Amino acid sequence: MFVKLKKFKMDILIKKFIDELPTEATIKSDLEKCTKAFNDNLDKLKEIGKAIRGIILGEAPQNFENYFYNSKGNKSGTAFLSPTSINGVKDQEELIEYLNSKGVIVIDLFPLPLPTYYYTSTSFYKTDKNCIKVIEEYWNKIIETIKIHNNGSHESIVLGVRYKKITQSNKNGHKKMYNQFIDKLKKVIELENQPLELWSDNMPVNTDKLKELIKNLIE
């Protein structure tokens, strides 16, 4: 139930909310920055001669500022995967270096850097044929990039999924999209395991499952 306020007072809230929404220019800029940061990290893997042996799958970066591979903007880490999840790791840059040393990369199910709300409360990306085609091309490009990086090797890869809703939520269509992505992935890359559930009841990553992922890489 709403109480009535003077229109100009509500307008203050509405304008503030609209000002906080991402603009087209912001989305495009963040997408370009996220793409560059991801590719720069792949170059680092090449420099140390490390094949991709593990994948941590997220939903989508909320923006570039909070993107996993933006270590300069996220020195203390993000809620997605905190440096404290790994013993001895002090900050985001060290966390990225640690995962690189193990051949683990972070990828996202959806390409655009947007807050979770846009993926959980909209349906266009799973009903509009043109949008679905673009997302499938995005998946194909990721898979192709991994294959090329590994020089076409069929060495198996360990997969961990960060959020439960990606694999189990029927309401927003994530489960269907996730299954389609996994089917595409399996056609090109052998998975060493059933995807590990890296989520916990609260926001933090399940550190036991993360350790299991790392352990499987070592073995």
Image: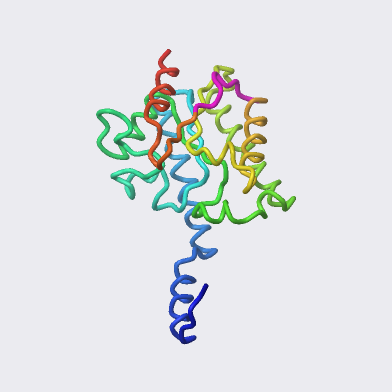
Which residues are drawn in magenta?
Answer: 188-196
Q: Can residue 186 be seen in this view?
A: yes
Residue at 48% in and 33% down? 56
The extreme top residue here reads: 219
Q: Where is residue 11 in the image (x, y as percent from the top left)?
A: 47, 81
| 163 inside magenta stretch | no
Please tell me which residue lies in front, 121 or 149.
121
Please tell me which residue lies in front, 121 or 114.
121
Residue at 48% in and 75% down? 14
Residue 211: name its quadrant. top left
Residue 207: name its quadrant. top left
Residue at 38% in and 46% down? 70
| 189 inside magenta stretch | yes
Quarter of the image where the C terminus is located? top left
Q: Is residue 31 visible?
A: no
Please tell me which residue lies in front, 102 or 2.
2
Q: Position of residue 152 (x, y in %)?
A: 59, 22
The extreme right residue here reads: 129
Specify how the rendered protein is coloured.
Answer: rainbow
Q: Where is residue 6 in the image (x, y as percent from the top left)?
A: 46, 87
Residue at 42% in and 29% down? 45
**Magenta residues, dominant SS class:** loop
